[in-house]
Structure formats: C-alpha cells, structure tokens
Amino acid sequence: MKDLDAEALCRQLAEQIRPHVGPATALVGIYTGGLWLAERLHAELGIAQPLGAIDVSFYRDDYASKGLHASPKKTEIPFDVDGAHVILVDDVLYTGRTTRAALNELFDFGRPARVELAVLVDRGGRELPVAARYCAHTLAAPLAPEQNLELQRDEAGQFGLMLTRRA
Amino acid sequence: MRNPQLNQHGELQHLLTLDGLPRNILNAILDTAAPFTEVAEREVKKLPLLRGKSVFNLFFENSTRTRTTFEIAAKRLSADVVNLNINTSSAAKGESLLDTVDNLCAMQADMFVVRHAASGAPMLIAQHLQNTGRDHIHVVNAGDGRHAHPTQGLLDMYTIRHFKKDFTNLTVAIVGDVLHSRVARSQIAALTTLGVPEVRVIGPRTLLPTEVERLGVRVFHDMREGLKDVDVVMMLRLQNERMNGALLPTPQEYYKIWGLTAEKLALARPDAIVMHPGPMNRGVEIDSAVADGAQAVILPQVTFGIAVRMAVMSMLGSR
C-alpha cells in the first residue's frame, strides 16, 4: 500500500463529507483506526455535535467462537441519538460485519434520523449488504483474506496505511 | 496440576476463588468490567453477548444483593435467568447437590451461579462437570461457606482501582469479623496478588483466624493503631448467624470498641474511602454518619458489582 497516501485520502474524505454537514450531523468513530480518523474529520469539518466513539466488542457476531475481545473500550455517545444525522467512521471497509455491529449498538442509544458510513479505504470482500456513502479510495481488486489493512498513526499524529499478513 | 479454574489455554473456565488466580487474569476482569459500567446509562440497557444462554442462579443460602446483581448482570447480557431457591425445593426433599446439577444440565444450563453454606460446593460442581465431559458449562461461585466470594472481592478491587487508580502504593485495612468472612479471604487474596504493599486486618482475637499472618497481612488488635494512615477501610459485617458460643460481648460493646465512627476514621488518611460488602449492621460495625458520609463508597460498590459480574459472565460464556 506504499502508493496510498493516507493523509491525502483523509483530506479527500473530508471534502466528500463537507457539503452534507448540517447542524444535526454527528460523527461516531469505530475503535481504533476509525476513531482516529473521526477525530481528524471532526476538527477539519468543524462539527458542532460532540464526537462519539464505539467499541463493537460486545456486539460482534464471532463472540461465540472467538470469545470476548481483550480489553474492550468504553462506547461513548455524548449526543442525543434521537433524530440525529450520524456518520459512522471507520478506516477500512471489509466484510461489513463491524458496520453491522456498530449499527446495532448505535440503535440501543436511540433512533437516528439517518445513518451514513464514511471510510478511508474499501478493500472489497463484503459478506453483508453494506456500502459506504463516503469513501476516499476503493482498491482495484479485493485483498486476500489473510491480508490485513489498517490505519496507523505515528507519534506526530500522521496517518499511514499498513498492510500486514494475519498471524 | 493446572488451576481448575483455567482451561488448557490459560483462560477462565470457572470462577471459584481469587486465591491462586494470576494477576493478569484479575486485571483482565477489571479491564473488561470498565466498559460495562457505561451500559447502565443507555436507553436500552442490554448487550447481546449471552443471547440464547441459560444462567441458573443456584442459591442454597439466602442472599438479596448478590442474587439480584447476578440476575441483573445476566439479564443485561441477554441471558435467560432461572432463579432456584433451593431451601424450598428438591434439596429439601432429599435430592443430592450433584443430582440437582445433572437435572439442570438436562434443561440445557450454560452457567451455574452457586451460593452454598458449605465451603467447596461450587468446586465440587465444577469437578463433576469436568469429570463428565461437560466443559461448555461454567460455574461462578457466589459465596461458599467461609471459603470465598470471588465476585465480591473483584468488585471491591474495581472500586479501589476506580477511586485510588493504583494498588502499589496503598495501605488497606480489613476490619471486623475476619474469622467467619469469605469476603475477607477473597479480598486478601486479590489485594496481595495485585501488589498492595500493606494489607492490615483489624479485629478482636476471637474473630481473627489463627495464623492469619500467613496470608501476608499485618494484624492489629487495636483499631486506632490499625487505622492510622490507611487509604482504604474495608468493613466486614458481624456475622451473628455463623457464630456459635460466646465469641463476643454484646453488640453495644462491640460497637464501642470495633465500630467505625467518624472519630476513628479521622485517624486514616483524609482521602481514605470506606467500603462495606453489605448488608450493614448500623450501630454495630459502622456508625450511620460514616456509612452515609462523604468518604463512603458503599453504594458505588453495588453498582460496580453489576459491571464486574457482567465481565466475569461474558468472559466465561463464549465457549
């Protein structure tokens, strides 16, 4: 993924979202990469509603086989979900299962008026009917299942995309 | 021999006692409990983790708080909860403990939460399940005899960590009837495992176990001396129902010497917290003004207890 400039993609994503931001727009980042991205977008777009964060560990569909994810984080939705225009933010869209879990969790806080999905990269390989309204880059060919693509953030706060092989 | 509470991968299989449970497991439970505290603030106070699982609360001994918080925890995890009050059921008709367990297994139980007056009863059930190859069924000890009350010990650790952040610079005093207290044994095991440098037990000689020092605690028979400069005061309930013979003078005299009053609490550090596992005997082991005072964290203990029990059940319940 050397050719993918995460910083440039992040700016593109912000510009895609900007025309659709209104007073009821709220961002919710999915741990961990999605939250970093959402923090950046939240500041860049001057969103009025406070930033939300979701850890989907308690809603994952592989809990029965894989158990609870180690040290889950606190989900925090600091705005009123009822009637809100929520943009879920994740770094990489893959099977769609994380998005499904995040949607289920979000609806336990209330009934949003509209929910959209924003991602930096679509890596293909969907297993659920999920699509991103805002997407900075779609890979020409889907990645193989053993490959793992995720957002990294260095000490200076700069974004990079890291491709690794799953253990 | 491996710890009977852990499976071959070193993960929690049953929760029977905190004695011998490694620090990384204790910390994992406390870390996992933290995000569960937030669920209470949601509109829908429910998570789908134990959907389709059946949790049986097997209480062979009375309890209100513990049974209720286990029930709330299991329900918030979407489990089906069945409460069995054994005093009024089959055991009264002569059925053995393991026969009761086998019958409930035949009703597709996934987890047993067990309280029993006999020390070791939950362990007996866990061993029986292992011997009969039913590794998918888990046991949580909700208090057995004088032996252990691990979820109470864990929620106490969660409370201390919440208010004091770090265990490794604390002085903690456990006060009162240590002899009859399974809570005290679980507290001492957890505090020492988590690296608390000084754990004190304070109480009359008749209510401290012999050789209690071997648990790694400092013993005080003078409350004023023992409370000096402590960060955490953990009061114990005077367990009248477990006493036989004259271990004590009257409750009034006990209060005079061992009751926690504002005057005695003033000897602890000014930011010391006061804990009690409940139910409290006001005017016996604790003064009302202290129990309701600014330093008391007794009600937060109850609330944290739900999150800690959710953490334990969700760590056990996946396999």
Image (cartoon, rainbow, N blue to C red):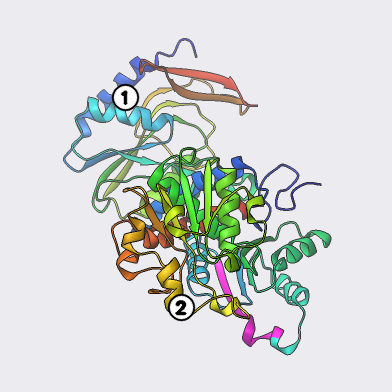
Percent coordinates x, y for residue A61 in the rendering:
55, 48
Percent coordinates x, y for residue B168 in the rendering:
49, 38
B148 to the left or right of A96: right
Give the residue type that dot 2 points to.
Pro
Which chain's residue wears label 1?
A
Percent coordinates x, y for residue B148 in the rendering:
63, 61
* Outermost residue to the top: A3
In the image, A11 versus B20, the foreground residue is B20
Give the residue type that dot 1 points to.
Leu
Q: Nearer the viewer, mark 1 or mark 2?
A: 2
Q: Find disc 1 in the rendering and name its residue.
A: A13
Tell me which residue sits at (46%, 68%) in the image.
B278
* Outermost residue to the left: A23
* Outermost residue to the bottom: B93
Residue A12 occupies which quadrant of the picture?
top left
At label 2, counting other C-alpha atoms closer than 10 Å, the crowd grade (few under 14, some 14-19, many 20 or more) is: some
Percent coordinates x, y for residue B92 in the rendering:
69, 87
Residue B265 occupies which quadrant of the picture?
bottom left
Q: Find disc 2 in the rendering and name its residue.
A: B251
Whether residue A68 can be seen here: no
- Indicate whether residue B84 is drawn in magenta: yes
Q: For mark 2, give the secondary structure.
A: helix
Q: For mark 1, give the secondary structure.
A: helix
Which chain's residue wears label 2?
B
At label 1, counting other C-alpha atoms closer than 10 Å, the crowd grade (few under 14, some 14-19, many 20 or more) is: many
B22 to the left or right of B162: right
Magenta highlight range: B80-91
In the image, B105 versus B130, the foreground residue is B130
